[in-house]
Image (cartoon, rainbow, N blue to C red):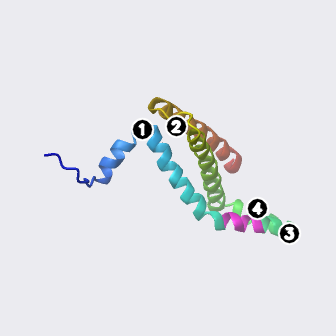
């Protein structure tokens, strides 16, 4: 007799199965990037407010916040998260129109989107940090 009851898998088993598929990787990272961007919204709003307040406030922001490792790192993480979320979200939108929905097409589309996101994040790193 076959049991249709759900089985609780360990986290190691779930990761071992999901890290083999570029579709699963892109989906998991898309969710993580969305949470990171959401959590960094207050930091981004603070940076925007200070940059628009006055010339002196902008100079202080550049020197005291963006000039530090923590400030530059937070800005890079937010920007990289936005870039990744945008690229993978665009992939999901295109797939909603029926393009790349087959198994092989989805894998290829996810691999291309991940590679494109990696290149864009590398460009963002060079632009923000360097």
Which comes sooner in the sequence, label 2 or label 1?
1
Viewer-nearest of discs 1 and 3 = 1
Which comes sooner in the sequence, label 1 or label 4?
1
Viewer-nearest of discs 4 and 3 = 3
Secondary structure found at label 2: helix
Q: Which residue is drawn at 47% across and 32% down?
A: 102
Which residue has dot 2 on it?
A: 110
- Give the Cα separation between the discs numbered 2 and 1: 9 Å
Which comes sooner in the sequence, label 2 or label 4?
4
In the rendered view, does 14 fall on the left or right side of 117? Answer: left
The verdict on residue 45 being magenta is: yes
Which comes sooner in the sequence, label 3 or label 2?
3
Q: Nearer the viewer, residue 120 or 61?
A: 120
Circle on res. 62: 4
- Give the Cα separation between the discs numbered 1 and 4: 41 Å
Viewer-nearest of discs 1 and 4 = 1
The segment highlighted magenta reads 43-49
Which comes sooner in the sequence, label 1 or label 3?
1
Tell me if label 1 and label 3 are in contact, CB under 8 Å: no
Which residue has dot 3 on it?
A: 54
- Give the Cα separation between the discs numbered 3 and 2: 43 Å
Label 4 CA crowd tier, 10 Å (few <14, some 14–19, many 20+):
some
Label 1 CA crowd tier, 10 Å (few <14, some 14–19, many 20+):
some
Tell me if label 2 and label 1 are in contact, CB under 8 Å: yes
Which comes sooner in the sequence, label 4 or label 3?
3
Viewer-nearest of discs 3 and 2 = 2
Secondary structure found at label 3: loop
Viewer-nearest of discs 2 and 4 = 2
Q: Is the residue 102 above or below the residue 43 in the image?
A: above
Circle on res. 21: 1
Q: Quadrant of residue 24?
A: top left
């Amino acid at each position: 007799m076959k049991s249709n009851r759900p089985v609780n898998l360990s986290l190691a088993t779930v990761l071992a199965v999901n890290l083999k598929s570029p579709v699963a990787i892109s989906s998991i990272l898309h969710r993580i990037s969305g949470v990171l961007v959401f959590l960094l919204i207050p930091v981004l709003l603070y940076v925007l407010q200070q940059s628009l307040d006055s010339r002196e406030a902008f100079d202080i922001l550049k020197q005291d916040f963006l000039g530090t490792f923590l400030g530059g790192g937070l800005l890079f993480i937010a920007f990289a998260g936005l870039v990744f979320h945008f690229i993978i979200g665009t992939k999901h939108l295109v797939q909603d129109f029926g393009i790349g929905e087959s198994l092989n097409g989805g894998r290829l589309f996810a691999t291309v989107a991940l590679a494109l996101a990696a290149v864009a994040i590398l460009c963002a790193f060079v632009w923000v940090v360097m």
